[in-house]
Amino acid sequence: VTADIRAHPGSPFFRRQRDLDRIAELSGGSLLAVPQSILAQVDVRIDPGAAVELGIATDVPPDESLGRAHPGAIRLDRSDGRFHLPTTPNRVWDGRWIHALWLGPDEWLVLDFTSRPADLAAALRTSLEGLHHSVVDVSANRVALVLWGRGRHELLAAGCALDLGRKAWRPGMCSQTLLARVPVILVERYRFTGLLVRPSFADYLVDWFVEHAVP
Amino acid sequence: MRRLPTGGLIDRSKPIAFVFDGNEYEGFAGDTLASALLANDVMVVGKSPILGRPRGIMTAGPDEPCALVEVTEPYVDLIVPATMVPLEEGLIVRSMSGVGRLPTGPAKSVRVRHRHAHVETLVVGARSALPHRGRQPHRGRVMIVDRDPSPWAMGRTGPVEIGSWLRGPEATVLLGAAVVGVFDDGYVLIHERSRPIETLWHVRAADVVLGAGLQERLLAFAGNDRPGVMLSGAVRAYVERFALVPNGPAVVFTTNERGEDAAGALAKAGVPVYLLSLVTPTARHRALPEGCKILSGSVVVGTRGSPRLAEVLVASDESVGSIEADVLAVSGGWNPELGLFRGIGGQVRYDAEMDWFEPASGPPWLRVSRSRDQAERFGLVRYPFVPADDLSEHFVDLQRDQTVADIVLELDAGLRSVEHIKRATYIGTAVDQGRTSSALAAEVVNALLGSTAGTQGPTSARPPWSPVPFHVLAGPYRGALFDPVRTTPIHPWHALLGAVFEDVGQWKRARYYPRDGEDMDAAVQREGRAVRTGVGMMDASTLGKIDVVGPDAGVFLDRMYTNAMSTLGVGKIRYGLMLGLDGMVFDDGVAMRLAEDHYLVTTTTGGAARVLDRFEEWLQTEWPDLRVYCTSVTEQWATIPVAGPQAREQLASVGTDIDLSNGAFPFMTWREGTFAGVPARLARVSFSGELAIEVNVAAWHGLRVWEALLEAGQAFDLTPYGTEAMHVLRAEKGFAIVGQDTDGTVTPDDLGMSWIVNRKKGDFVGLRSLGRPDTIRDGRKQLVGLLPADPNLVLREGSQLVAAGAQAPRRSIGHVTSSYYGPGLGRSFALALVESGGDRHGETVMSPLAGEDIPAVLTSPILYDPGGARRDG
């Protein structure tokens, strides 16, 4: 097996660095695609109302004030403020190193950039003890690609039916959708769009990006 | 026709050469193919598809029913009206006869992209929906679409640049773009012929404004299809926009005042005009320029000329005569163009005052906008066709070659509704979607039935409203991008080693790994023998995997599988079968109990998504009371079964803290620990019948662990094997594959697996159907083994089986579902579904193939190691 495969066995996106560079080149600087490592990803399923009723979580109302804006959420009380799960649909709770993505009324994807998968899962299980919950390590189940640049929404619009206009698709939002027939999770930030995808689809997606970057 | 030296909206400083039917011509920038052909006096551009009559150019827009052409350079369009082809350098076109032709040979590379857009307002047909002066009528994101490539529209006070009334970057103007269809909730498909990449826009609009222009209709008289007969609006467009005039005099025949405008335009350009107007003389007549001769009370009764128009036969009550002319402008009346509106279910009503059909009601997000000149009233005489004894050359739909006589025939047959007549004659069903013919056909029917005008109106058309090539609908999704290709974490290794892949759903799976000079059979035998005698490994990462978590997980799985999963001990594994509601085998896999409230179940590669969907469906719709969550973890894990008598030694050599001995790690259990330096879950499951241990590691470690196994495996000649060898090995053990040995009509009992149906544990999906009379009748097809008399002959999969000695006509008693040469058996064998097969072991049946009967003996499907001695090594 060649060195570049061996160097990045985890995410196929790293193997495709040359093609990703080509996308940036062809876009004339309006697009940059960068693979990203996320240490731990855990899928959490609970009934947020039941968590509050049981007294292990507290409702946090949405705050739209400048600089502190966050969606409505529940805070898991036993986690010292580490874990918030957004209850506003399609929103991300943005902790410093831990992000929680709303995937459904009873499902979240918790991303942790500093913990090991087993530690994150254990911490979440501890926070949810006593409540019917599912905490499943899915750290290797998806890989991440970050799209920078002002051309990113136009690129995505070639294969994604979501409204990615400024008013409908704002920073702090996330969505499970299809991109080029591939199931993905999109996460919108101020300067980039994050894309989480099952690794089996990564090569196909890069091929699709290249096809759409060529003028 | 000929080109005037001045005038028109063409750019005479930019001549453009083009080729039509092998002849070179020249036109100017701003021309369409149609106007450039007319400028070269090419009046005949093809033949009609059914009758083979010469046809010319009848219109100047997308309503063209005759001049359909095929563009071969510089792009490919298999069927397009010449009126819709902008003239460009290098254009090569050929005529056709209204029938498209699929090109043979390599497809020309046409690049197409799809693009999704969301707007607050979509304006279709900008020219007919010009905003009132100084007003900004639209909020938010606006898209304006017009099929004409010209950026200029005629406003009331002069030319207006389309979209110039919009401000800001949120406005998109698509010119030369055709609306394919308007669909539910403001979803609109638009084909933009952009270069070098064409675009299919998927637009979702909160509001759609349809600018409805006026559609002119034909008037039926004998020989109204002769090249040179044109709609009056088209003649006007060719004179004013393209500076084209007839070679000699022109005749204008109209039922309405608007049609008389063509006479005005022609006369203004210096053409001698004979105007046959059925309208009572009005102010307009008096305003007509000199050189315009009005023949009151006359109608056109025929045309002459071969192949193109040379003479127009004219008759009044008193006299009959003829006029030499090469252009005859015709106007049978006008209707707002409501094709898109009606395509989405918009209803129309007859407006007696205007004598046309108006929008009545439609979806709330859809509005029809009318340009102001339409509000202008114009006289109209109801006169759909010129009476004659012979109506067989009174054409109504030129693209379908249908005449008034054809309508008469259907009325004589008892048809009354225009909808029925449309389906009997195909009027209005051609590429032009009846733009010039539907309203005329309805008027002809009304007249022939003696109904008042508007009793029946034009039929509606469904998308595509404008023809759209299949390659545009396919867009970039062809070739390598046709469908997502899924690969496992170990895929790069398979690819480098030259594995031959097979498609399993969207997955690429390594089918076999040919060594130098090996064909598939040789490679599969080598790989299979390695598993039977030494050790092999394969990439099974594609198997579906679902975490089922919650206090009711056991109860839930009991209801999904035929056997009991709640009684499974933690640390243990159980094989399970799932049935459809019809009692037929749906999917299979194993369940591992990871904790009291936590199972991991596996599914077939192709069944992963539908099994999870089914779990969610039952949980959400039938048993919301069950405390269970399901999460797909298919791609969390790389799965590598290591199988063969030497599997334990092979695994131990890689390094693990898990005790692999049979006592500590028995069959159908799992253990967690470290393997090759990474966290792993090992499982004692076997699909080959050999001692096998399945290694599960996080997907990102998959390739590393695969390579570690290979490296350590050199001492054991560890052989990677593909899905083909896997299929052969499992078949020797009689393990059915769902979807290969089953086809949706097979019960567990048919597979000889009644042992897996637990009827005591309570209800489960499919149980009720297992008691249906047909499910329990005698004579159902059952899974059997099949040994051909010739041990080297491999039966064909799918071949039928007949009883030995049966007399013709012989009936099939079953069919072969899997057939291989068995590396463990050392002979050929097959699995088959045979009527009452379970009771017929030992019987000889015949497989008739190519005129020859191949004898084979029915046996138990479990051919290899029936006692199961090998699974513990």
Image (cartoon, coloured by chain):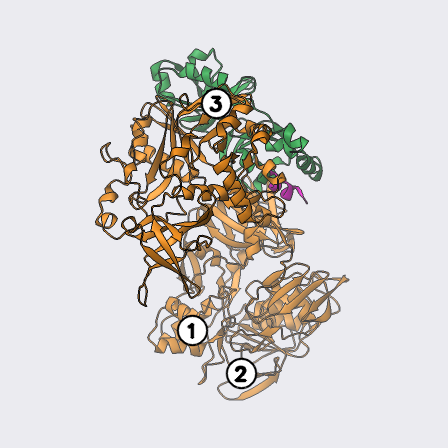
Chain colours: A green, B orange
Assign the N terminus of chain A to one quadrant of the image: top right
Q: Nearer the viewer, mark 3 or mark 2?
A: 3
Residue under disc 3 on the same chain as residue under disc 2: no
Q: Chain of mark 1?
A: B
**Residue at mark 1:** B444
Alpha carbon distance from label 2 to label 1: 18 Å
- Residue lying farthest to the right in this orientation: B13
Above or below residue B627? Residue B850 is below
Q: Which residue is mark 2?
A: B302
| Mark 3 and mark 2: Cα distance apart in space | 77 Å
Q: Is residue B790 magenta?
A: no
* Region in magenta: A206-215
The C terminus of chain A lies in which quarter of the figure? top right
Q: Residue at x 32, y 53 (%)?
A: B834
Q: Let me know if residue B722 appears in the view.
A: no
Height in image: B48 above or below B494? below
Q: How many marks?
A: 3
First along the sequence among labels 2 and 1? 2
Decide which of A159, B64 is in the foreground and name it. Answer: A159
Disc 1 to disc 3, C-alpha distance: 65 Å
Label disc, if present, on residue A71 of the rendered structure: 3
Residue B37 in view: yes
